[in-house]
Image (spheres, helix red, strand yellow):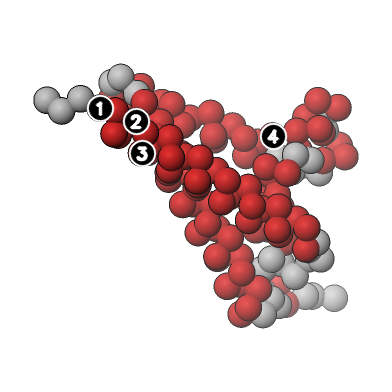
Amino acid sequence: MWSASCCGHSAASPLRWLAALGLLMLLAIALIWLSVAFGLAAKSVETASNMPMFLILLVFFGSGFVPVHSMPAGLRWFGREPALHPDHQHRAQPARQPTRRHHAITAIVWSLMITAASYLWARHLYNRRPVQ
């Protein structure tokens, strides 16, 4: 039997879509501040453009492409880490998959911690720069 989501339509409520969008925006703000801090810490333009590149690799270590239980032991441990809960939560929201409240809270807390730490680091780096 065909489901509503097979043809590009989601069965998720507008509230779930709004929650997914909010979580995505929160994660985007965290990564933006982290990139700003990396840019301020860099000594050259080339270094600034390459410092956040390792963040792209984190996507491949999560469960976005393969289930966690099929990963080797070392990657399985990393795939279950709470830092990846924003990824799990974002995929589960619009798909109407069961979500766990602690995953949502962990995703929000991790995003806020990354944002706060990156903001404070960027502010520190900006304030210590000598005026030329």
Report if the CB atoms under discs 1 and 3 are less than 8 Å apart: no
Residue at the farthest left position: 132
Kindly tell me whether residue 9 is visible in this rendering: no
The quarter of the image holding the N terminus is bottom right
Q: Are marks 2 and 1 in contact (CB under 8 Å)?
A: yes
> Label 1: which residue?
129
Q: Are marks 1 and 4 in contact (CB under 8 Å)?
A: no
Q: Residues within 10 Å of mark 1 (few under 14, many from 20)?
A: few
Gap between marks 2 and 1 measured at Cα: 6 Å
Image coordinates of residue 19 in percent, x first then y, are 61, 69
Out of 2 and 13, give the one closest to the viewer: 13
Residue named by callout 4: 61
Mark nearer the N terminus (1 vs 3): 3
How crowded is the residue under tag 3: few (<14 C-alpha within 10 Å), some, or many (20+)? Answer: some
Element type at marker 1?
loop
Residue at numbered disc 2: 125
x and y, in percent, of residue 52 in the image: 46, 31
Secondary element at tag 2 = helix
The amino acid at mark 3 is Arg
Image: 105 above or below 48: below
Residue 22 in view, yes or no: yes
Q: Quadrant of the rendered structure where residue 11 is?
A: bottom right
Callout 1 amino acid: Arg
| Among the two numbered marks 4 and 2 on one chain, the one whose residue lies closer to the N terminus | 4
Q: Residue sitting at 81 percent across and 32 percent down?
A: 77
63 vs 21, left or right, is right
Name the residue that disc number 3 marks.
123
